Image: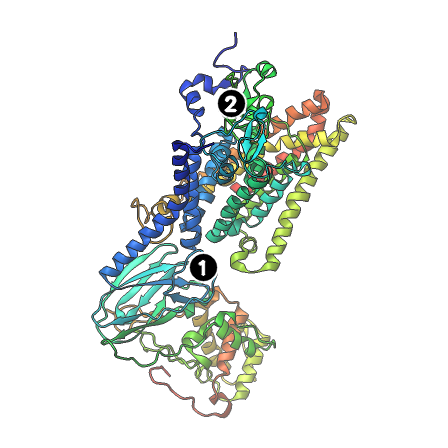
Amino acid sequence: MRSPVLGCSPQRLDVLAALPPLDRLVRRRWLPLAPAVVLLALLALFVTAGVLGTPVGNRNGLVVFVWILWWFLLIAVLLPFGARAWCAACPVPLLGDWLQRRSLLGVRSADPRAGKDGPGRLIGRNRYFGLARRWPRALSNIWMQNLGFLLLATFSVVLLTNPLASAVAVGGMVILATAVALVWRQRSFCRYLCPVGGFLGLYSLASALEVRARDRSVCATCRDKGCIAGNERAWGCPWLEYPSRLERNCACGFCLECVKACPHRNMGVFLRPPFAERRLAGWDEAWKAYLMLTLALAYSVVYGGPWGGLKDAANIAESGDWAAFGAYAAGLWALALVVVPGLYLGAAWLGRRMAAADEVSVRQAALAGAASLVPFGLLVWIAFSVPLVLANGSYVLAVASDPFGWGWDLFATASIPWTPVVPHWTPWLQAALVGGGQAAGLRSGWLESLDAFAQRRRALAGFAPTAVLLTLTALLFLRLYTG
Amino acid sequence: MKPTHRELLAASVVLSSLVAPVAVPLGVEAWRRDARAAGMPTITLTGLMDQGAWTDEEVTAGNAWRRDFRRARPQLRVGGTVRLRLASADVVHSFAAPGLGIDPVEVYPGRVLELTVTPAASGIFEYYCTTVCGRPHFAMRGFLEVFPAEGDTLPPLPERPGAGYWSIPPPAGNGTVARGAWLYRRQGCVTCHGEAGAGGVPNPNSMNALVPNLASLARRTFFFTAADLGAFLTVLERSTPLATVKEAPAVPLFSLVKAQYLATYHLVRDGRRSSKLDPAGHHPPLDMPAWGARLSDDELNAILAYLLTLDGGAGDGASPPHRKGESP
């Protein structure tokens, strides 16, 4: 008999089965709406601060709470332990969801045979307002997210120092998400356009949480298919996935509509070992891995390095030097889209030659190598983010009392001076994270190479150049972080 | 589908979550502003490094990109207490109005510092930023006008030289003197030392009360003819550092000239804190900055070369004029 606690794998813990109160909670229709509304209120507050508050970045609620606190919590806590749980409560698509569904708590379901019962288009058993078009097949990948994230990253120094720029970026994302929701169906924005969603999807592979079917044989005989078609209890998967066949975290937004919809209570949330998922699906995901690694490196150099000229070049809002910014941007894009991918592709090509594995395509070898960049990339991003929050965390307390910089002191913390926390430990912490990332990356890459090359000896030869490159990259990070 | 009560409630909550975070803070701030104004007149001054000004306009993240904020010209009444709210939109500034008893206070970016002032006498009082906050720092000055009573008038505000000095273009030629003249303006020396080194800018409670005149620098460096000065400038251009030059036959009294020149050079390079006239009084708001941290040796020499050429007396042997309050 299958254990009610242990799910389909002995290595996974069925969280909802282990915690019945949580199981009852996630089936409520006000989840994840309630946290999303709270976050929407905070978003509105911070965007207001970004326009009407002080222009000083480190004293403005938008910059401090979004780029310091939220970013750190997202990359270092939510993502490793909660996969894309952020996406469930993200306030950015909330208004678009509301417009599409014309309901916040209810489900607009209908029996397709009953004909039209109101405005909107019927998809499965749910009726949606708006054009509800299918997302173009040619763009059904994360290339747009890759380019969107790179574009935002190019202006990251501006976003970090200029609250108005951040307000425009964040507010623009809400407007874009809402507009996209009126034209394309369900969470097309989150899945194919959201710049943050792209990297959340990639690194959620390394996460310790997943939503999966408990028993696929139940799904095979299920006639309701409410998880994809929707029913009277829930909307069909907003992420356009077939939840019963989920094998990867990438496109699961953790909204848990499938858990609510399943008449057999066959969908569960599972705790699993970290870095359990390794497979990358295509070039778009591989490039995302290269891109994220490059940006972690570039940010570490620009923000953490002693090269003031580089920082000035990146900060076009203050320097006004478009020639220097153009050179910086061109260098960053070339590095992220050509140089670093070229190095890792070259390593994969060389490994394939060394393994004499003609039957393994360059694509297979490259994707196996890029798999190593998922845990490594996640941990170097955390390593980059740790000093941000340790050094600047005291701003959070000060700005909590005066989010607009208007001279308020709500919690008597406005006068707390800038106080870096354990600055002498930071390099050690970063070194440990980089070392851990390298070890996890080598393990993931090795296991994927074993799958790709089939034999240990050939896998060893095939992965060796990528492993050397990864190690050199880790040493470069160590050099940057520890001097 | 007819909306249920729960649905309507949820819609209200979502709409409130959009409106309340905008309306509530704005309402609270408007109420605080009214409460402040009801207590006593309040003047908010925000330091803007890029513009080299303190402004009394509201500076927010949404309008900080502007470069045309009005330079503050606060007007007070004798005996009337006013609350000054000091803020900075960019970097750390320091605000001082010695004539009104406001000693330098540091103003940190994004924070508001409040102080009260009750003018005891009427007049025009200069206010300053006393922390070198950026290139336009030396323009961060203005005037507080204190009127004796309603309807009274005060003399016109004095002109201060060097407006917009930080953005003047470099000279077309490469001559040392022309470059020095440009640097003299470009670095803001002109804002304290005046056009053509004329000096005369007040520096309250300093020994001389005014910033020194530099127009007689050539005579003070023992140049009495244009030919002597020309010969020295040739040596200066060809032989840097000057300290290593042992002799220059074309320059009379070379060792004396050299010692005097180097003393001036070191003063410009290393700066000097102004001495107080009244030891118990406030520190004078204007100190000589240490330019060696920002300018190269060549640039320092170019500025001094320009200053040396200001002395008309070096050309014809005439005595340079002495100005009131300056040390000869």
Q: Position of residue A406 (x, y in %)?
A: 35, 54
Indicate how the structure is coloured in the image.
rainbow
Residue A155 position (above or below residue B212): above
Closer to the camera in the image, B209 or A278: A278
- Residue identified by numbered label 2: A261
Question: Residue at 52% of width from left, 52% of height from top?
Answer: A158
Q: Quadrant of the C terminus of chain B?
A: bottom left
Question: Residue at 48% of width from left, 79% of height from top?
Answer: B307
Residue B198 position (above or below residue A463): below
Question: Residue at 68% of width from left, 26% of height from top?
Answer: A449
Whether residue A334 appears in this view of the structure is: yes
Q: Secondary structure at mark 1?
A: loop
Whether residue A58 appears in this view of the structure is: no
Crowding near pointer 2: few (<14 within 10 Å), some, many (20+)? many
- Residue identified by numbered label 1: B63
Q: Position of residue B121 (x, y in %)?
A: 22, 74
Q: Position of residue A323 (x, y in %)?
A: 62, 59
Comparing labels 1 and 2, the label whose residue is closer to the camera: 2
Give the side of residue A467 with respect to residue B148, left or right: right
